[in-house]
Amino acid sequence: MDDAAVRRRLAELRREAARRLASLEDQLDDIAVARRDANSDDEHDPEGSTLAFDRAQAAVLAADARRQLDEVDAASARLDDGTYGRCERCGRPIPDARLTARPTARLCVDCQAAVERR
């Protein structure tokens, strides 16, 4: 795989995750303001989801965006140190098709499957 193309793709993934995280953090701030200003009994609002549910959902999505940022940064570090594209478990090359589909992959398909079976 071409290192320059991988770097561009990782940079794109990082920008997307950072944008998503910033938006979710704004939502969390808005929810905090709404909770402070709202009736404390939003659990019985027949109009829709509760502030607690909205906050929990945004928090989970923000954690996922942070995890993706960490994965992209780790993939970039592997690219810098020459270990990108090698399975961290067995040391074999990760197929280009897998890296194209999942540029942050740390494991080959066989090792990923073995880890998921545990």
Image: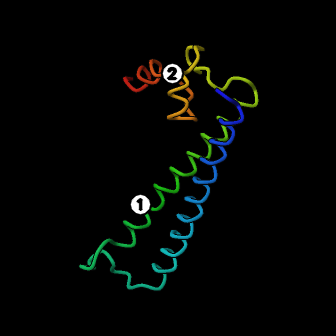
Disc 2 marks a residue whose amino acid type is Cys
Q: Secondary structure at mark 2?
A: loop
Q: CA distance from mark 2 to mark 1?
A: 31 Å
| Residue 45 image point, x, y percent | 28, 79
Q: Residue at x 50, y 28 (%)?
A: 98
- The residue lying at 55 percent from left, 59 percent from top is 20
**Residue 65: percent from left, percent from top:** 54, 52
Q: Which residue is mark 1?
A: 57
The kind of secondary structure element at disc 1 is helix
Residue 50, compared with residue 106, is above or below; it is below
Q: Residue furthest right?
A: 80
Residue occupying image coordinates x 54% and y 33%: 100
Q: Earlier in the sequence, mark 2 or mark 1?
A: 1
Name which quarter of the figure residue 7 lies in: top right
Q: Residue 63: x percent and y percent?
A: 52, 52
> For the residue marked with disc 1, what is the amino acid?
Gln
